[in-house]
Amino acid sequence: KLTPVDGQGLVDASVEEFFSFYHPDDLKQAMTFISMIFQVLFEVKPEERKNLNITVYIRIKNKEGKYVWNSLQYPALYFDENDTLLYGMALYTNVQHLIKPDAVPMMTVLDSSQPDKQVFTYYSSLGQKGLEKPYPITSQREKEIIALLSQGKASKQIADILGITKNTVDNHRQRLLKKFAVQSSAELVIKALNL
């Protein structure tokens, strides 16, 4: 649904076909971000790569042929003993409902190697190079709640999914609103994804 082909179709696609799914105006930036991902990965020690959460926000053609904003995350990348990338996993998420009309392609890197100081770096197609921004320290539970909010889930649904009470979800949400200095859950999700 998120791409013109299913998962196997993505695996089987030629390089040309794969990149034909990207919006033509975003393709150059997509290629730049892919290059930057490898640069970021090889700047850290192999054992520290698991601490990097890399996300690219870009328009990709869906099954209906319409370009929609997606976040592409790379939660698992596997290297051989010579430090050559063998394969990886990409997670596509439709974030069309969270993106502002004037949005541009962007890439973010969250380095969580230091629990007391997470480093968030933002790259965009507007020519900014590695703009570091402070990212509020969030617990694993808060991250789960932000992720579920980004899917449009209500407090009751989140409570059911996480096996906690609706009150607990609402308390977490209120704390998150303060941490991110926003007024609504929608603003929270946008800021958490774009910080």
Image: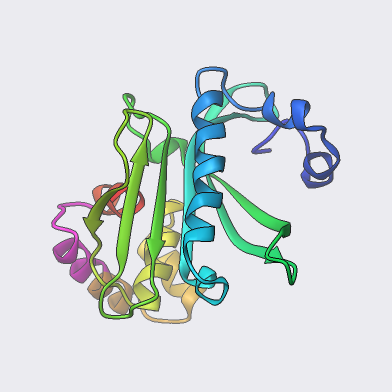
Whether the magenta-drawn stretch holds residue 115 is answered as: no
Q: Position of residue 9 (x, y in %)?
A: 83, 39
Which residue is situated farthest in the top direction here? 24
In the rendered structure, the answer to whether residue 181 lies left or right of residue 69 reads left
Residue ID at (54%, 33%)? 30
Which span of residues is magenta-colored? Answer: 173-184
Q: Position of residue 78 (x, y in %)?
A: 70, 65
Q: Relative to 40, does residue 36 appear above or below in the rendering?
A: above
The answer to which of 49 and 172 lies nearer the viewer is: 49
In the rendered structure, the answer to whether residue 56 lies left or right of residue 2 reads left
Q: Position of residue 44 (x, y in %)?
A: 48, 66
Q: Relative to 34, does residue 17 appear above or below in the rendering?
A: above
Residue ID at (57%, 18%)? 24
Whether the magenta-drawn stretch holds residue 178 is answered as: yes
Residue ID at (53%, 59%)? 42
Q: Relative to 171, does residue 56 appear above or below in the rendering?
A: above
Q: How is the image coloured?
A: rainbow
In the rendered structure, the answer to whether residue 1 lies left or right of residue 98 reads right
User: How many marks are shown on the rendered structure?
Assistant: 0
Q: Position of residue 91 (x, y in %)?
A: 61, 53
Residue ID at (40%, 77%)? 140
Which residue is situated farthest in the front direction here? 82
Q: Quadrant of the N terminus?
A: top right
In the rendered structure, the answer to whether residue 129 lies left or right of residue 70 reads left
